[in-house]
Image (cartoon, grey):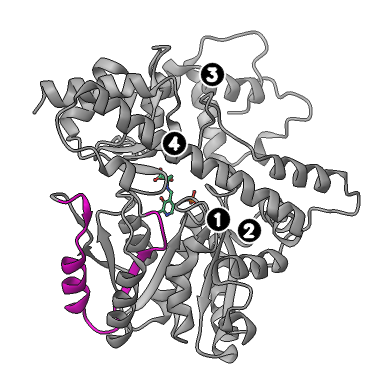
Amino acid sequence: MAPANVHPGSGSPQQQPSAERRLNSLVRHLLPSSPRRTAESSSATLESSPTMASQVASVFAGIAQAPEDPILGVTVAFNKDPNPNKVNLGVGAYRTEEGKPLVLNVVRRAEQMLINDPTRYKEYLPITGLAEFNKLSAKLIFGADSPAILENRVATVQCLSGTGSLRVGGEFLARHYHEHTVYIPQPTWGNHPKVFTLAGLKDVRYYRYYDPATRGLDFKGLLEDLGSAPNGAIVLIHACAHNPTGVDPTLDQWEQIRQLMRSKSLLPFFDSAYQGFASGSLDKDAQSVRMFVADGGELLMAQSYAKNMGMYGERVGALSIVCRSADVASRVESQLKLVIRPMYSSPPLHGPSVVATILKDSEMFKEWTVELKAMADRIISMRQQLFDALKARGTPGDWSHIIKQIGMFTFTGLTSEQVAFMRQEYHIYMTSDGRISMAGLNAKNVPILADAIHAAVTQLK
Ligand code: KET
């Protein structure tokens, strides 16, 4: 049956795909007649009429509601809370003393320079990203005088922040590395097991890392677990500022870990999401990684500029694979391209351009390190303030781990019930494992948090 009125220019019924034609005809049949109903207006009516649309069963009808992400879901819940005094200590994102997100001055300056440059265009980047950014990123983490860089043994590709770097690295290993067992610390960033499993490394296992009794490193457990791992297994290592525990090995412990791993040919996969946030020094925070590079062995490195340059939403990161020779590195890079191209083709341009502008200019680089140190120092002062506030309240328990742990988080030891209580009664939001993002604290909300912790530990034992 031909439609009574076809709007000029809307195409003849013969040009419409047949399923759409049948649907339009059904709508016309079901709807009360109107004087001028066209093919265009009929389909618009279908879409804008919830009653009509809901009468047709969805092809996705069987889909279950997925749970929110354990970390990013905290922000979703926080945003829904109308309480004006609510506090978000969930996601690891830096906030100023005024509780506002921070764009570093040096980043603003670099962005302005890029905008003012009329020679810049928006062509696709190569599959591997911005070459200059890749070189500078490798130097930042491995050191400008790194033998691996000088010998051209590093394959670096720009990726979508730390997560994307882990994912591309994981998929590369799943395709080209003989061992698919990957060891991650217990506990670790919640996304690690999912990223590796979906990348094709299906055998994800945990190694002991944290001892709740001492609130410190379970060094003995760590050595035992890595010692009994199959030769060649992949080991995910937090380069510094371990998330969520804020507990890092000492240099001496790193050395023992390195020796053990190399003796068993365990392949290190470093995750560096917080370079500069642990100590305030970029070089100091890269020491663990550089020890592993110095021995000439191979490793993977996932780097993120989300936290240390505040580039969160720009998704800027890099994956570097340190190889034994330049020849191997070049072949590795060629295979990384085959992982990336069907995934997202090529990475974005703006973020790495900003980062490269800063890294290559010694004066801007210096300005960055000053701003980075200021962020790290503010977090350290929040640790002291929270510790003092709990002491002043006589809150039961030893809270010295708040000042001992490093990086963005404090792993408080609060139970999930206590966390739920604090959300309910004080509108304080944190992850259910008791992790607090210290960067979300300021002089105004520290007393509220201390009151909440005090109430939680005294009322819910
Ligand atoms: N590694 C670790 C250890 C990490 O904590 C994060 C982010 C990432 C990688 C990924 O960051 P990216 O933005 O992809 O560069 N952690 C914080 C944010 C998040 O969960 O996405 C967090 O733990 O709150």
Q: Say whether mark 1 is within 8 Å of ligand 1.
A: yes
Which comes before the other along the chain, label 3 or label 4? 3
For mark 3, give the secondary structure: helix
Inspect this view and state whether residue 365 appears: yes
**Residue for badge 3:** 48
Taking the spot 33% from the left edge, 19% from the top edge, the residue there is: 448
Q: Is residue 293 left or right of residue 6?
A: left
Q: Are marks 4 and 1 in contact (CB under 8 Å)?
A: no
What are the residue bounds of the magenta stretch? 214-241
Quadrant assignment, res 418: top left
Label 1: element kind: strand
Q: Residue at x 74, y 62 (%)?
A: 360
Between 11 and 429, the one lying in front of the other is 429
The label shown at residue 33 is none
Q: Dot 2 lies on which element?
A: loop
For image coordinates 70% across by 44% down, the residue present is 107
Say if 188 sits above or below 62 in the image: below
Tell me the quadrant of the picture where the C terminus can be found: top left
Instruction: Determine whether label 2 and label 1 are within 8 Å by CB.
Output: yes
Which numbered disc covers residue 347?
Answer: 2
Q: Mark 4 = which residue?
A: 381
What is the spatial separation of the Cα atoms under label 3 and label 1, in whole angstroms?
37 Å
Question: Which corner quadrant of the image does residue 232 belong to?
Answer: bottom left
Give the residue type that dot 1 points to: Leu
**Residue 160 numbered tag:** 1
Asked if the residue at tag 1 contacts the one at tag 3, i.e. Cβ–Cβ closer than 8 Å, the answer is no
